Amino acid sequence: MNVDLTPEQDQLRDAVRALGRKYGHGYFVEKAKTGGHTTELWNEAGRLGYLGVNIPSEYGGGGGGITELAIVCEELAAAGCPLLLLVVSPAIAATVINRHGTEEQRKRFLPGFADGSLKVVFAITEPEAGSNFHRLGTVARRDGDDWLLSGRKCYISGVDEAQYVLVVARTEDSATGKLKPALFIVPTDAPGLEKSKLDMEILSPENQFLLYLDEVRLPADALVGESLDAGLPALFAGLNPERITVAAMGAGTGRYAIERATEYTATRKVWGGRSIGSHQGVAHPLAHAAVQVELARLMIQKAAVLYDAGRDLEAGVAGNMAKYASGEAAALAVDTAVQALGGAGMTTEYGVATLLGAVRAGRIAPVSREMILNFVAQHVLGQDKSY
Ligand SMILES: Cc1cc2nc3c(=O)[nH]c(=O)nc-3n(C[C@H](O)[C@H](O)[C@H](O)COP(=O)(O)OP(=O)(O)OC[C@H]3O[C@@H](n4cnc5c(N)ncnc54)[C@H](O)[C@@H]3O)c2cc1C
């Protein structure tokens, strides 16, 4: 087993780290507190090619895989800039269009993903269906060549920053009459699409929205793929990249928090000449969190390598485990860092409590820890499905 990155991946990691540090957590927090977006960081990362690392080179991208995109997600987060839009746009939406879109859709959309000028967010969650996507109620019906989309979505990230939203809906299967999933590329300014911002207790420049689709009229080519049969595989195509990149973001956030805390505990002295980090009651929880973050990173690397090798089923197991491990490790690392900093841990200046909401959400979204445990119990441990 090779645990080393390639020289190109190493260079990418160093370069993204440098970019992330140029902006830093202060920039991220300032944007979040003033209702701004991380547009400058996003645009610069796009110009430098970091947002399109996983897009095939014939469409202007870097020709790499999810391994490279995970590096970008992790390093920006490790610099205090965890960007959720990286997960929804280049990881989910670009992968779905690349793998299951028509050639026309690839030509139209992938160059924009490659340079970051295009942001496409992802809408699957619905108020009634929740974790159970089999209950999705957003329906697409034919009207001549067009489609008409109606339904409601919730917690959809970044709609205010994106040109399109990839909406998961259902259509009637003409052969069986049953409903089956279909994905539509919907302009965020389409008539009939309304958004309403949710008040979330997460300090982030990225916002979540309720979406209302009222007979949104779409041309035939808004459907991802050549036919309705592309729907289910297209939906599943987005899941592994989603889990792996969100896990990478969590691992980066964990690294960031531990770094902030250990810088502080190595120099803070309140008992004579000893640093507080010399007390095992302070150092051990940080060391424990560091072990958990590093274990998560190893699983992320495994999942990304399997995914890039086309081993989707194994990547699915590893990606879910990586997402679980990383979600727990990031939450532990941030909470432990806050504790190690004492009162300073709760200040904005020291930049760790600012991440409490985000890492808490990372145990719920985009897939909750319970749904991952259900998956592992069923598919790895061979237990009957309980729901
Ligand atoms: C910050 C944030 C950003 C998000 N961004 C997006 C986005 O961009 N696009 C999008 O589509 N969605 C997004 N979501 C939604 C997210 O994916 C869902 O919140 C998540 O999948 C859980 O669904 P739910 O909130 O409906 O919870 P529910 O399904 O109502 O579940 C509530 C609780 O019950 C547990 N539970 C449910 N069923 C079971 C079961 N069978 N066994 C055990 N436990 C169970 C869950 O794990 C959870 O803890 C976002 C959410 C957040 C918080």
Image: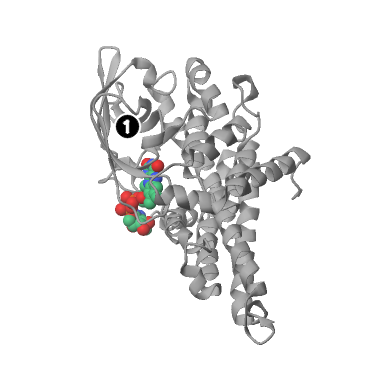
Q: Is residue 349 above or below residue 276?
A: above
Q: Is residue 188 above or below residue 357?
A: above
The picture places residue 349, in percent across and down from the top left corner, at 51, 62
> How many numbered marks, from 0 up?
1
The picture places residue 63, in percent across and down from the top left corner, at 65, 28
Q: Image quadrant of residue 278?
A: bottom right
Q: Which residue is mark 1?
A: 169
Taking the spot 45% from the left edge, 55% from the top edge, the residue there is 358
Taking the spot 53% from the left edge, 26% from the top edge, the residue there is 98
Colour scheme of this structure image?
one colour
Q: Is residue 91 visible?
A: no
Q: Between 385 and 75, which is closer to the camera in this rendering?
A: 75
At label 1, the amino acid type is Ala
Residue at the left extreme of this rendering: 214
Q: Between 7 and 309, which is closer to the camera in this rendering?
A: 7
Residue at the bottom extreme of this rendering: 272
The picture places residue 228, in percent across and down from the top left corner, at 38, 23
Taking the spot 50% from the left edge, 57% from the top edge, the residue there is 327
Q: Between 305 and 380, which is closer to the camera in this rendering?
A: 305
Q: Is residue 44 visible?
A: yes
Beta carbon at label 1 within 8 Å of ligand 1: no
